[in-house]
Image: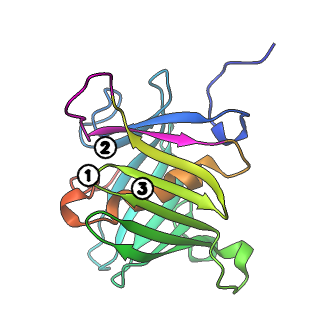
Amino acid sequence: MSSTSAPIHPANLPIPVDLFVSKKHPALPRGVLGFADSSGKIIFRVNRQSSKSSSDDKIVLLDSAGNPLFSIYRHQDGSWQGFKGDGDEKDLIFKVQRILNKFTRTELEVFLVAENQGESTCDFKFKGCHFQRSCTIYKGDSIVAQTSLMHKLRQIYVRRNKFRLTMFPGSEDPALIVALVVIFLVNGPKKFQFLDKLPLSI
């Protein structure tokens, strides 16, 4: 009989797994972005930090206990870097380059530092639309994850303050996928950036 305990590692399951993304989760301070499972349990949350000594933005992805999983930095040239944990320079995990950023279309390329070893071939690609809160993450020709608004039957207006992240079966680290989705959310046209009002610091 299989266990139904907390799905901390959904990418290891043989079926797609949904996380529900919102800044209005009752278990978190208002404005803090959370990723919850189908039972409402927070699996990941996001905090933004500011530094007077740097012009670069920093976003931290934490687990449910508040431990830092990735520190994500946005640079002035529009690129991003993701570091393991608190962001030690030796722990660089990925780089993200913006390829296209328009009202109806955003495209990003992701390079995993340890796997590329200096090669220029990207490991993941994003394609999506910020207004619809929708993006698809590809690894080669395979879909790794997708975000989508939560439509209901006969619903005329679909709220954009809560949406679904679906991660498909595979060996990808779910925390890495969530970190990439966070970058997508803050990388669009300013009026559609989902983290523009995140509280500062943890």
- Label 3: which secondary element: helix
Q: Amino acid at mark 1?
A: Leu
Residue 156, disc: none
Vertical placement of residue 157 versus 183, above or below: above
Residue in the image at 44% along x and 24% along y: 40
Q: What is the x, y in percent for residue 25?
A: 32, 31
Q: Nearer the viewer, residue 28 or 22?
A: 22
Q: Amino acid at mark 2?
A: Val
Read off the magenta span.
Answer: 152-168
Q: Amino acid at mark 3?
A: Val
- Label 1: which secondary element: loop
The residue that disc 1 covers is: 198
Residue in the image at 21% along x and 65% along y: 190
**Mark earlier in primary sequence (1, 3):** 3
| Left or right, 151 with reference to 42 | left
**Does the CB distance between marks 1 and 2 fall below 8 Å?**
yes
Cα–Cα gap, marks 1 and 2 = 6 Å
Residue 121 visible, this orientation: yes
The residue that disc 3 covers is: 182
Specify the principal SS of the magenta part: loop
Q: What is the x, y in percent for residue 109?
A: 52, 72
The residue that disc 2 covers is: 32
Cα–Cα gap, marks 2 and 3 = 12 Å
Which tag is nearer the camera, tag 1 or tag 3? 3
Q: What is the x, y in percent for residue 127?
A: 46, 62
Vertical placement of residue 146 versus 18, above or below: below
